[in-house]
Image: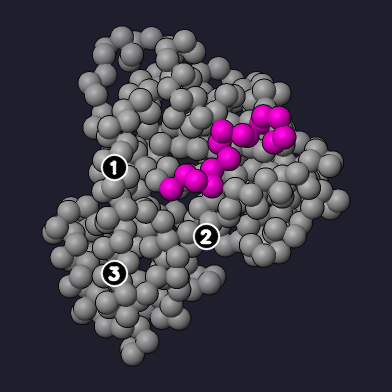
Amino acid sequence: MLEHGGRLHLASRRYGIAMSDWVDLSTGIAPWPYPVPEIPLSVWQRLPEDDDGLIDAAQSYYGAANLLPLNGSQAAILALPRLRSVGTVAVLAPSYGEYAPAWRAAGHRVIECAAEDLLQQDGDAIDVIMLANPNNPDGRRFSRATLLALAWRLSERNAWLIVDEAFADVDGENSLANMAGMAGAENVIVLRSLGKFFGLAGTRVGFCIAAPDVLSCLQETLGPWPLAHPSRFIAKAGLGDTAWQAAQKEKLRAASGCLATLLTTNGLPPDGGTALFQYVQCAAATALYERLAQRGILVRHFAEPCALRFGLPENETAWARLENALRQCGCPANS
């Protein structure tokens, strides 16, 4: 099993610190979730139906014509590799750790590429390119024009470009959601989810935006009711709440800026990030991770390259604890 953020039970056991005493900054999930409305009893009692308004809400929010609700975008990450004949897949690295294993498990040859090398790939040798935009964990962004040019080159042999836009809600100017599967971008597949921006990872709500034939095959693979009725109800409410979305964007941008300043002040200037996290490459990242964990601050550690990812503190108490811990740990460059 690959490591992910949010494994607070494991950290609690390892460091002997009670669950309630942690500041968990390891996930990149908004610490202020969408205020979930009361769920009617009928939603729990009945199977979901496609005409419940969720599709309309999602189409409006993403500007997408063709999409399929999923049990989190992870469902598509696992299923899409089984919709193509075995071939060669280029995956951005470093990036979300589930991409490459999913394609390998389906028998494909996987090439993990740095961004510069990935953008040079074309349809002569590659059947699929998969990347995240913005990238997780370093926040790297690919322009819309760059990705569309890449998709056009891949289309020569019907190769796919799959873009995971899990962190694109706040700054979506580079999103391909409104073009995926449409004329001129028929080979583009976009994945979106409610986990990060809406702070609703536990609902396991995601969407695949693609050409109708791709969505039809994906739906057949996943079977009926791929998304629970309560999750559909919550997703419809959140996707339609434009006032909350605007306020959330402002709050996240401000907090991310404060986090970048705090890290820089303590000798850890970020090398990248998004409105939901900051990414710091640091030779002493492993030691700093341990020092923070010993003080009840959980961040995400990466070994290759050696780096830390910091999510957003939830409240003033969490901010103060992070600031104190960083000061106590000292600048890694001097330790």
Few, some or many residues within 10 Å of mark 2 (<14, 14–19, 20+) = some
Mark 1 falls on what kind of element?
helix
Mark 3 falls on what kind of element?
helix
Q: Which mark is residue 9?
A: none
Q: Residue at x 67, y 38 (%)?
A: 188
Q: Quadrant of residue 199?
A: top left
Judging by the rendered image, the residue that carries numbered circle 1 is: 248
Residue 97 in view = no
Amino acid carrying mark 2 in the image: Arg
Tell me the magenta residue range: 171-185
Q: Which mark is residue 140?
A: 2
Judging by the rendered image, the residue that carries numbered circle 3 is: 261
Q: Residue at x 39, y 46 (%)?
A: 170
Gap between marks 2 and 3 measured at Cα = 19 Å
Dominant secondary-structure state across the stretch colored magenta: loop
Gap between marks 1 and 3 measured at Cα = 20 Å
Q: Earlier in the sequence, mark 1 or mark 3?
A: 1
- The outermost residue toward the left is 317
